[in-house]
């Protein structure tokens, strides 16, 4: 058995069905059940709306609401050895900035599967890689051979660079 039916016997189901039929036949019960914010008088709706707007405008109320929200931990993305250094550098920067593949995909306007494929089996197109790097406040640049480390970042200062 699964879901809400776990542990329910046929007698219990029949009793629950009888109870629900009796409740649905009672107009007072149905009326109480259907009372929601949409069925309130206009004056009461306006008063409730004003109270909620005042609460939401109060910085102390907002701070109290936020303190209960846990910071999203997230785990670092694993980067396989065979990954291209430029892509490796992008994933290192994503890990440092705690950016998920989903967040990056929404920033860049790409599919999440693209980022997964870059890590595992495909090399991105230059324009896609540049867009992803720009979302991380990085840029794709041409550097002399041997000037970058295994993560794709510059490991020495280039002569003439300011």
Image (spheres, rainbow, N blue to C red):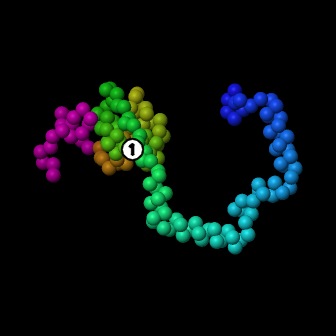
Residue found at x 12% / y 48%: 160
**Magenta segment:** 141-162
Position of residue 58 in the picture relative to residue 18 (left or right)? left
State which quadrant residue 89 falls in: top left
Q: Pinpoint residue 143: horizontal percent, then vertical percent.
A: 21, 40
Q: Give residue 117's quadrant in the image.
A: top left
Q: Residue at x 69, y 73 (%)?
A: 43
Check if residue 110 falls in the magenta segment: no
Q: Is residue 90 visible?
A: no
Dominant SS in magenta: loop
Image position of 162 (left or right of 33): left
Residue 86 in the image: x percent, y percent? 30, 36
**Which class describes the residues within 10 Å of circle 1: few (<14), some (14-19), or many (20+)?**
some
Element class at badge 1: loop
The part of the image, by quadrant, that contains residue 157 is top left
Which residue is situated farthest in the left direction here? Answer: 159
């Amino acid at each position: 058995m699964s879901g809400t039916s776990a542990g329910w016997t046929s007698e219990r189901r029949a009793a629950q069905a009888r109870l629900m039929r009796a409740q649905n036949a009672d107009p007072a019960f149905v009326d109480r059940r259907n009372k929601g914010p949409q069925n309130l008088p206009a004056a009461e709706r306006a008063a409730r709306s004003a109270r909620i707007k005042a609460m939401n405008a109060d910085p102390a109320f907002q701070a109290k609401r936020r303190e209960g929200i846990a910071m999203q931990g997230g785990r670092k993305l694993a980067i396989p050895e065979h990954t291209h250094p430029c892509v490796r550098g992008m994933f290192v920067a994503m890990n440092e900035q705690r950016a998920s593949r989903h967040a990056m995909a929404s920033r860049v306007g790409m599919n999440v599967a693209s980022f997964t494929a870059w890590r595992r089996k495909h090399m991105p197109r230059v324009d896609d890689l540049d867009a992803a790097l720009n979302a991380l406040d990085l840029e794709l640049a041409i550097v002399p051979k041997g000037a970058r480390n295994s993560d794709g970042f510059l490991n020495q200062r280039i002569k003439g660079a300011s």
